[in-house]
């Protein structure tokens, strides 16, 4: 039965907004304490592996998957301890905000040492189809976005970095522990909540939002609306600390 409640052709004229993942309202994020455990597990059992380097770099720089994937060897300065994100759309490594996403991001001593170990001892010495030397390389060239996404789902499964499954499942009989099924785990997270948790951690650590904005390549408006998981109580206590120092 057709009700004909609106005039014919109206749906054609309605512009449906297309949102990026980070612009959508999401509550999921990886807590800092869990992220520490995830990275500690990788350091202990998968040290300097491709998953370890990928996820550690993502968490530390607050970067998107595509930005980490886009890094070349030439974009890493171990002496000055920073990485450079460059928009190279014609070579299959665009950045989300194009040229505006280009930036230098400082890295810690620990990340610099990890990258040095990866580059000197573990990194497959390959080039991609454009003749570039990717930082996160595989035996076939540059790592795929889907592969890094798989790392996030796999290594944020609680049964891999905690004593037991938080869902009460037996890992030996859980379908989500099978290769390629990790995203089916209700407690694991994709790279976006991983990045979201990192941004929240930096904000809770009293890093000004404008500094987080520049480092993470996300506007302060978007940070406030979709990334800042601090409660009003958290914000109050941070303001109290500033006032006590005046």
Image (tube, rainbow, N blue to C red):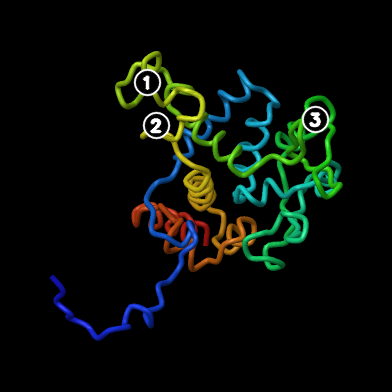
* Residue 108 in the image, given as x and y percentages of width and height: 71, 41
Query: Which residue occupies 84% across, 32% down?
Result: 125
Which of pointers 1 and 2 lies earlier in the amino acid sequence? 1
226 left or right of 214 in image:
left
Residue in the foreground of this view, choosing between 97 and 44: 97
| Dot 1 crowding, Cα within 10 Å, few <14, some 14–19, many 20+ | few
What is the distance, in whole Å, between disc 3 and disc 2 at their CAs?
A: 30 Å
Query: Is there a contact, CB below 8 Å, between mark 3 and mark 2?
Result: no
Q: Which mark is residue 199?
A: none
Query: Is there a contact, CB below 8 Å, between mark 1 and mark 2?
Result: yes
Name the image quarter holding residue 148: top right
* Residue 84 in the image, given as x and y percentages of width and height: 77, 53
Task: Answer above or below: position of 230 versus 97.
Answer: above
| Dot 3 crowding, Cα within 10 Å, few <14, some 14–19, many 20+ | many
131 left or right of 159 in image:
right
Which of pointers 3 and 2 lies earlier in the amino acid sequence? 3
Query: Which residue occupies 69% across, 58% down?
Result: 94
Q: Which mark is residue 174?
A: 1
What is the distance, in whole Å, between disc 1 and disc 2 at their CAs?
A: 9 Å
Name the image quarter holding residue 216: bottom right
| Dot 2 crowding, Cα within 10 Å, few <14, some 14–19, many 20+ | some
Extreme residue in the front direction: 1
* Residue 219 in the image, given as x and y percentages of width and height: 55, 66
Residue in the foreground of this view, choosing between 52 and 220: 52
**Which residue has dot 3 on it?**
124
Secondary structure of residue under mark 1:
loop
What is the distance, in whole Å, between disc 3 and disc 1 at their CAs?
A: 33 Å
Residue in the foreground of this view, choosing between 88 and 216: 88
Task: Answer above or below: position of 18 versus 155.
Answer: below
* Residue 27 in the image, given as x and y percentages of width and height: 37, 50
Q: Which mark is residue 185?
A: 2
């Amino acid at each position: 039965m057709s009700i004909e409640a609106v005039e014919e052709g109206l749906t054609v004229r309605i512009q449906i907004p297309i949102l990026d993942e980070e612009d959508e309202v999401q509550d999921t994020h990886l807590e800092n304490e869990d992220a520490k455990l995830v990275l500690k597990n990788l350091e202990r059992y998968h040290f300097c592996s491709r998953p370890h380097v990928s996820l550690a770099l993502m968490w530390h720089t607050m970067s998107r998957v595509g930005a980490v994937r886009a890094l070349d060897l030439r974009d890493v300065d171990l002496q000055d301890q920073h990485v450079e994100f460059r928009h190279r759309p014609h070579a299959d490594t665009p950045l989300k905000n194009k040229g505006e996403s280009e930036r230098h991001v400082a890295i810690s001593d620990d990340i610099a040492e990890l990258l040095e170990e990866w580059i000197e001892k573990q990194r497959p010495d390959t080039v991609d189809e454009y003749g570039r030397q990717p930082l996160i390389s595989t035996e076939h060239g540059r790592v795929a976005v889907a592969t890094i996404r798989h790392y996030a789902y796999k290594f944020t499964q609680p049964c891999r970095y905690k004593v037991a499954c938080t869902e009460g499942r037996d890992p030996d009989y859980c379908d989500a522990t099978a290769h390629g099924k990790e995203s089916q785990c209700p407690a694991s997270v994709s790279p976006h909540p991983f990045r979201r948790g990192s941004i929240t951690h930096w904000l809770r650590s009293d890093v000004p939002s404008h500094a987080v904005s520049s480092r993470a390549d996300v506007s302060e408006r978007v940070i406030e609306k979709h990334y800042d998981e601090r409660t009003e109580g958290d914000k109050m206590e941070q303001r109290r600390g500033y006032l006590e120092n005046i």
